[in-house]
Image: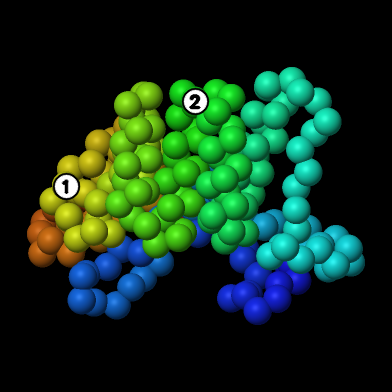
Amino acid sequence: SCRTRGRRGAHHASPGVDVHDRHGPRRRAGLNPSDSQFAPSLRPENATWLNRLQIDCGTVRFSPPASRNPGELYNFYANSGWVLVALDRSQEALQALERAQRIFPDDQFLYLIKGAAWQAAGRIQEAEQEFRAALRRGETANALYALGVAQANQGRYAEAAATMERAARASGSYKMFQLLGEVYLKMKQPQDALRAFDAAEQRSPYRGAGAA
């Protein structure tokens, strides 16, 4: 939906994360707008406008408002960082989020987005630090889920399963239970995996009347 120059192509979703064995193939999973709201997708209905205006998502710049109001500047830098993660411009996203944190340093949202930016850059340990910082500012299902995925990406499946159990039960999200089941499969615990998949099916909006 955007013009790009020498990049991997237009992105229609936020950077995911790779849940993988240390020596096995990677697969995309989790941390996208549909389940944890960490970063926006580039909406298909905007494609016509982006193409007509010749917007290059790899180089487009965001100008801060003329206002010196801290709230307005915070919103600008936080939102810019959020969008830049979705555009796969992690370093610029981190710079914007750092500026937002200088204004309001205790907003949990910023730590979650910074973690997503580090993940997109392949810096999983830094991402984990940000997710733990988010949790110190309040235990939420999204923060727990993000930490669990970061743990799984480092092959720490037992820790990841425990964290994701808490996230899934706190949120009731079928997608979180689904990923929890995949982690149990990595641990060769089929009974626990089946339990998680059953919980995901029970909560799925596509089950029963919801599938009609």
Asked whether residue 45 appears in the rendered view, the answer is: no
Q: Quadrant of the C terminus?
A: bottom right
Residue at 53% over, 56% down: 90
Closer to us: 122 or 142? 122
Q: Check disc 1 and report its element: helix, strand or loop.
A: helix
Q: Check disc 2 and report its element: helix, strand or loop.
A: loop
Kindly identify which residue carries mark 1: 159
Please state the horizontal and vertical placement of residue 66, each as a whole percent of the image. 83, 31
Q: Which colour scheme is used?
A: rainbow
Kindly identify which residue carries mark 2: 105
The mark found on residue 47 in the picture is: none
Badge 1 amino acid:
Glu
Badge 2 amino acid:
Pro
Could you tell whether 65 is left or right of 11 in the image? right
Closer to us: 144 or 166? 144
The numbered mark, 2 or 1, whose residue comes first in the sequence reads 2
